[in-house]
Image (cartoon, helix red, strand yellow):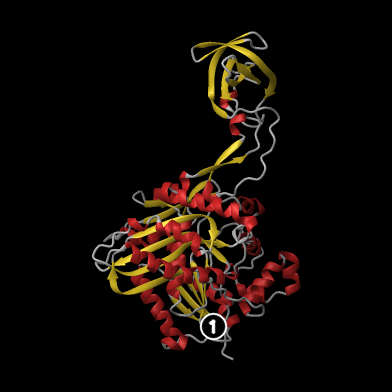
């Protein structure tokens, strides 16, 4: 069996160089990416030009601008950097199918049985360096028998230990100086060392011994504790009894040592391939009639839905693309109110938008894809029998309306817990929410229509007459009062007039309105109308 070989890639300037690639400056300026760390603005990634001036990750922004006043900066964007690292993972798939991400700026590649395809491990490193140079990226690479050893060599080989007096070691300074050192802000030294290293097979201990203890992927607190005891190199730890190490520092140190030496297995887990559901139909002659497009759609829907069923998923958004002979690709897209893999529920929605496709000089190919999918649930499968038919019909109606008005243009109400009448219901997009079950019974009569409170003049208590919308009305019946107060832990600007006593009253013309009297609070109270009863 072939000995396992692991390639570790580290991009020490990934954040800065990702943005410099977009700028395409002829003479790149000193550049740094700034992030928030414990309430302070610090450099998280710097370019080669900024590093040459003495700047490094972890350094405060104020100190950096004092050293380099013309430093150009950009805010940290973890999501974009993660997407860029995922793109690099796909690029690294040329070397091996087993590629795992090491966030925030590393890749781990299992080269076992693959290096000979490129002419050996040295050739692999040469291809890596050439590709990264073409991409404008700085890379540190190392090959070893274990992921832990490859990680350590890529990041720490060729870098000298920090020999300056920092107050951490016992033999350096007094206790008072060491206590101040724990509060001192420091920043990482510039990254250096060779671009690529290859550890000889079976020589893990010799390769790891001269490296700093941080190369074992230990936490910062553990590294500082080891440094205070004078343990600065991996070799210093390998000579100590394992029992005392575990007793003093826990299982973290011994576990990392075992992983680096290959005594504990550490697999390289590649990211799974994303689910992709799409089918296409290549036409012998260009088409341009609606009937022909519909016929092609009918041939595509069946295979697409079969693929969805095999994976137990349903479509939430479907896209139909028409590849024209002139190179244009018009497309229509529809969203479904309920996850489904039934062709008869997807086709009517796409048929509503087929007229939006301009055939031009003819369509050579049709492509149908499920852009967004979800796992099929019990609710998603409703409609197969009589019991699920109402839910299916409602979902189809919402889908048809959404195809014409937009998915966000069709809404539904959902009950909410609040004492404030205007906040007892939430407005949700019907396509992305489930229908509510039985609504909770209100503590009293509630109006059919709610509107912003309108000031009125009332005579009597209980009220006998009311002047509303410039008309004096007589009250023939009044029910109440019902006192309502908002949640005391929430700030309600509209309720600064204090508690409210609500009345359901009937006017002599037959109108029924919802009337309340504000008791007064931060602002004065009064009488108001807030709704109309059924």
Where does the image place residue 204, in percent across and percent down from the top left? 58, 81
- Which quadrant does the C terminus fall into? top right
Q: Work out whether 406 lies above or below 361.
A: above
Where does the image place residue 460, in percent across and percent down from the top left? 64, 8
Task: Report the side of 461 relative to 451 (left or right).
Answer: right
Where does the image place residue 468, in percent across and percent down from the top left? 53, 14
Q: Work out whether 166 lies above or below 477.
A: below
In the image, 197 versus 96, the foreground residue is 96
- Which quadrant does the N terminus fall into? bottom right
Which residue is the extreme one toward the top? 459
Hey, which quadrant is residue 464 in on the image?
Answer: top right
Task: Report the side of 360 relative to 8 (left or right).
Answer: left
Q: Secondary structure at mark 1?
A: loop
In the picture of the structure, the residue carrying the numbered disc 1 is 5
Q: Is residue 194 something one can see in this rendering?
A: no
Residue under the point 66% across and 80% down = 263
Task: Report the side of 228 relative to 455 (left or right).
Answer: right
Q: Work out whether 50 lies above or below 423.
A: below
């Amino acid at each position: 069996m072939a000995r396992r070989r692991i390639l570790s890639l580290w991009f020490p300037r990934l954040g800065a160089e990702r943005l410099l690639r977009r700028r395409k400056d002829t003479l790149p300026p000193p550049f740094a990416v700034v992030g928030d760390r414990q309430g302070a603005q610090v450099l998280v990634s710097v370019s080669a030009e900024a590093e040459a001036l003495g700047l490094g990750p972890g350094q405060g922004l104020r100190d950096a601008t004092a050293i380099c006043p013309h430093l150009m900066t950009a805010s940290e964007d973890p999501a974009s950097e993660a997407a860029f690292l995922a793109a690099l993972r796909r690029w690294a798939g040329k070397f091996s199918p087993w590629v795992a991400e090491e966030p925030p700026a590393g890749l781990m590649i299992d080269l076992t049985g693959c290096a000979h395809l490129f002419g050996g491990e040295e050739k692999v490193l040469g291809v890596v360096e050439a590709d990264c140079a073409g991409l404008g990226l700085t890379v540190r690479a190392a090959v070893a028998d274990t992921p832990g050893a490859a990680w350590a060599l890529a990041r720490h080989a060729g870098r000298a230990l920090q020999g300056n007096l920092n107050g951490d070691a016992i033999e350096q300074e007094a206790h008072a100086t060491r206590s101040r050192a724990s509060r001192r802000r420091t920043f990482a030294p510039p990254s250096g060392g060779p671009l690529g290293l290859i550890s000889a097979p079976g020589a893990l201990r010799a390769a790891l011994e001269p490296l700093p203890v941080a190369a074992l992927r230990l936490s910062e607190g553990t590294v500082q504790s080891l440094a205070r005891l004078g343990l600065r190199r991996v070799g210093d730890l390998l000579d100590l009894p394992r029992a005392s190490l575990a007793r003093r520092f826990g299982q973290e140190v011994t576990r990392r040592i075992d992983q680096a030496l290959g005594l504990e297995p550490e697999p390289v887990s590649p990211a799974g391939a994303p689910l992709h559901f799409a089918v296409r139909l290549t036409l012998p002659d260009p088409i341009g009639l609606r009937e022909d497009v519909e016929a092609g759609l009918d041939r595509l829907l069946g295979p697409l839905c079969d693929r969805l069923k095999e994976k137990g998923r349903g479509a939430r958004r479907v896209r139909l693309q028409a590849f024209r002979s002139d190179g244009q690709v018009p497309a229509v897209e529809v969203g479904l109110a309920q996850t489904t893999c039934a062709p008869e529920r997807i086709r009517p929605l796409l048929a509503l938008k087929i007229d939006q496709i301009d055939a031009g000089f003819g369509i050579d190919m049709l492509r149908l894809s499920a852009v967004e999918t979800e796992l099929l649930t019990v609710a998603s499968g409703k409609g197969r029998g009589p019991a699920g038919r109402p839910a299916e019909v409602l979902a189809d109606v919402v889908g048809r309306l959404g195809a014409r008005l937009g998915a966000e243009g069709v809404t539904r109400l959902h009950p909410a817990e609040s004492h404030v009448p205007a906040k007892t219901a939430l407005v949700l997009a019907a396509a992305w929410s489930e229908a509510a079950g039985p609504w909770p019974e209100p503590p009293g009569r509630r109006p059919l229509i709610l509107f912003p409170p309108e000031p009125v003049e009332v005579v009597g208590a209980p009220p006998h007459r009311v002047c509303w919308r410039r008309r004096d009305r007589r009250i023939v019946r009044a029910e109440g009062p019902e006192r309502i107060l908002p949640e005391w832990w929430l700030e309600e600007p509209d309720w600064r007039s204090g508690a409210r006593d609500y009345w359901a009253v009937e006017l002599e013309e037959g109108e029924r309105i919802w009337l309340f009297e504000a008791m007064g609070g931060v602002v004065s109270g009064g009488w108001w109308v807030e709704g109309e009863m059924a």
